Amino acid sequence: QVRLVESGGGLVQPGGSLRLSCVASGSIFSINVMGWYRQAPGKERELVALITSGGSTNYADSVKGRFTISRDNAKRPVYLQMNSLKPEDTAVYYCNAELRDPGRTIYWGKGTLVTVSS
Protein backbone atom coordinates (compact mmCIF):
# COMPACT_ATOMS: atom_id res chain seq x y z
CA GLN A 1 0.00 0.00 0.00
CA VAL A 2 1.27 3.45 -0.94
CA ARG A 3 -0.14 6.84 -0.01
CA LEU A 4 0.67 9.90 -2.09
CA VAL A 5 0.14 13.50 -0.99
CA GLU A 6 0.69 16.40 -3.36
CA SER A 7 1.30 20.03 -2.46
CA GLY A 8 2.53 23.25 -4.05
CA GLY A 9 -0.32 24.15 -6.37
CA GLY A 10 -1.77 27.63 -6.59
CA LEU A 11 -2.39 30.67 -8.75
CA VAL A 12 0.49 31.99 -10.81
CA GLN A 13 0.78 34.51 -13.63
CA PRO A 14 1.83 33.44 -17.14
CA GLY A 15 5.59 33.13 -17.31
CA GLY A 16 5.83 32.35 -13.62
CA SER A 17 7.06 29.27 -11.79
CA LEU A 18 5.76 26.75 -9.28
CA ARG A 19 7.23 23.67 -7.67
CA LEU A 20 4.96 20.75 -6.88
CA SER A 21 5.87 18.13 -4.29
CA CYS A 22 4.64 14.58 -3.85
CA VAL A 23 5.36 12.74 -0.63
CA ALA A 24 4.99 8.96 -0.69
CA SER A 25 4.46 6.82 2.40
CA GLY A 26 3.93 3.12 2.99
CA SER A 27 5.68 0.59 0.76
CA ILE A 28 7.93 3.20 -0.84
CA PHE A 29 10.70 0.75 -1.68
CA SER A 30 8.25 -1.16 -3.89
CA ILE A 31 7.86 1.88 -6.15
CA ASN A 32 9.41 1.52 -9.62
CA VAL A 33 8.17 4.64 -11.38
CA MET A 34 6.72 7.91 -10.14
CA GLY A 35 5.03 10.44 -12.31
CA TRP A 36 3.00 13.58 -12.59
CA TYR A 37 -0.20 13.67 -14.60
CA ARG A 38 -2.64 16.50 -15.13
CA GLN A 39 -6.27 16.90 -16.03
CA ALA A 40 -7.70 20.13 -17.36
CA PRO A 41 -11.44 20.87 -17.26
CA GLY A 42 -13.23 18.86 -19.93
CA LYS A 43 -10.10 16.97 -20.93
CA GLU A 44 -8.66 13.55 -20.23
CA ARG A 45 -5.86 13.00 -17.75
CA GLU A 46 -2.48 13.15 -19.47
CA LEU A 47 1.10 12.32 -18.59
CA VAL A 48 3.29 15.30 -17.73
CA ALA A 49 6.53 13.67 -16.60
CA LEU A 50 7.81 10.50 -14.98
CA ILE A 51 10.97 9.30 -13.27
CA THR A 52 12.11 5.74 -12.71
CA SER A 53 13.85 4.36 -9.64
CA GLY A 54 17.02 4.44 -11.73
CA GLY A 55 16.63 8.14 -12.42
CA SER A 56 15.49 8.01 -16.05
CA THR A 57 12.97 10.68 -16.98
CA ASN A 58 10.37 11.21 -19.65
CA TYR A 59 8.33 14.31 -20.48
CA ALA A 60 5.30 15.22 -22.51
CA ASP A 61 6.30 17.25 -25.57
CA SER A 62 4.20 20.17 -24.32
CA VAL A 63 6.36 20.63 -21.21
CA LYS A 64 9.85 19.71 -22.45
CA GLY A 65 12.35 22.42 -21.62
CA ARG A 66 10.00 24.05 -19.11
CA PHE A 67 9.28 21.37 -16.50
CA THR A 68 11.72 19.23 -14.56
CA ILE A 69 10.90 16.14 -12.51
CA SER A 70 13.35 15.13 -9.82
CA ARG A 71 13.80 12.84 -6.86
CA ASP A 72 16.90 12.35 -4.72
CA ASN A 73 16.04 8.88 -3.41
CA ALA A 74 13.12 6.66 -2.47
CA LYS A 75 12.68 8.38 0.88
CA ARG A 76 12.51 11.89 -0.56
CA PRO A 77 9.60 13.65 -2.27
CA VAL A 78 9.21 13.77 -6.02
CA TYR A 79 9.27 17.33 -7.30
CA LEU A 80 7.93 18.91 -10.44
CA GLN A 81 9.59 22.25 -11.12
CA MET A 82 7.42 24.18 -13.56
CA ASN A 83 8.85 27.25 -15.27
CA SER A 84 7.55 29.55 -18.00
CA LEU A 85 4.00 28.54 -17.14
CA LYS A 86 1.27 29.08 -19.70
CA PRO A 87 -2.51 29.37 -19.29
CA GLU A 88 -2.82 25.98 -20.98
CA ASP A 89 -0.89 24.43 -18.09
CA THR A 90 -3.90 25.08 -15.88
CA ALA A 91 -5.09 21.75 -14.50
CA VAL A 92 -5.29 19.52 -11.48
CA TYR A 93 -1.91 17.83 -11.15
CA TYR A 94 -1.82 14.28 -9.80
CA CYS A 95 1.07 12.28 -8.44
CA ASN A 96 1.26 8.66 -9.55
CA ALA A 97 3.29 5.68 -8.37
CA GLU A 98 3.70 2.36 -10.16
CA LEU A 99 4.95 -0.58 -8.12
CA ARG A 100 7.37 -3.24 -9.33
CA ASP A 101 5.00 -6.08 -8.37
CA PRO A 102 3.81 -8.49 -11.10
CA GLY A 103 0.55 -6.58 -11.44
CA ARG A 104 2.32 -3.20 -11.66
CA THR A 105 -0.12 -1.75 -9.13
CA ILE A 106 -0.74 1.96 -9.51
CA TYR A 107 -1.57 4.51 -6.84
CA TRP A 108 -2.79 8.08 -7.21
CA GLY A 109 -2.75 11.13 -5.04
CA LYS A 110 -5.78 13.39 -4.70
CA GLY A 111 -4.27 16.15 -6.80
CA THR A 112 -3.29 19.79 -6.46
CA LEU A 113 -4.75 22.60 -8.56
CA VAL A 114 -2.50 24.80 -10.68
CA THR A 115 -4.06 27.90 -12.20
CA VAL A 116 -2.09 30.03 -14.63
CA SER A 117 -3.84 33.33 -15.18
CA SER A 118 -3.22 37.05 -15.16
Image (cartoon, grey):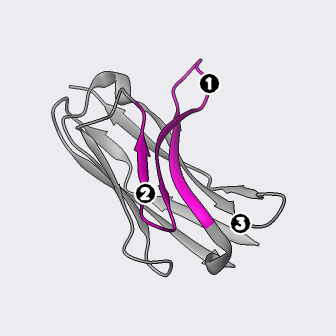
| Rendered location of residue 32, percent (x, y) | 61, 65
Placement of 44 over or under 19, stated as above or below: above
Residue placed most toward the observer, 33 or 114:
33
Compare marks 1 and 3 and give the one earlier in the sequence.
1
Looking at the rendered structure, the kind of residue marked 3 is: Arg
Whether the magenta-drawn stretch holds residue 33 is answered as: yes
The structure residue drawn at horizontal position 42% and vertical position 33%, both measured from the top left corner, is 60
Q: Which residues are magenta?
A: 32-60
Label 1: few (<14), some (14–19) or many (≥20) C-alpha neighbours in 10 Å: few
The structure residue drawn at horizontal position 57% and vertical position 59%, both measured from the top left corner, is 33
Label 3 near label 1: C-beta < 8 Å?
no
| Rendered location of residue 25, percent (x, y) | 61, 77
Q: Nearer the viewer, mark 1 or mark 2?
A: 2
Q: In 3D space, how far apart are the residues under numbered discs 1 and 3 (Cα atoms)?
A: 26 Å
Screen quadrant of the N terminus: bottom right
Placement of 95 over or under 87, stated as above or below: below
The residue singled out by tag 2 in the image is 56
| Rendered location of residue 97, percent (x, y) | 62, 59
The residue singled out by tag 3 in the image is 100
Whether the magenta-drawn stretch holds residue 15 is answered as: no
Q: Dot 1: what SS?
A: loop
Residue placed most toward the observer, 19 or 115:
19
The residue singled out by tag 1 in the image is 44
Placement of 109 over or under 117, stated as above or below: below
Placement of 97 over or under 93, stated as above or below: below
Specify the farthest residue to the top.
42
* Residue 61 as seen in the image, left or right of residue 5: left
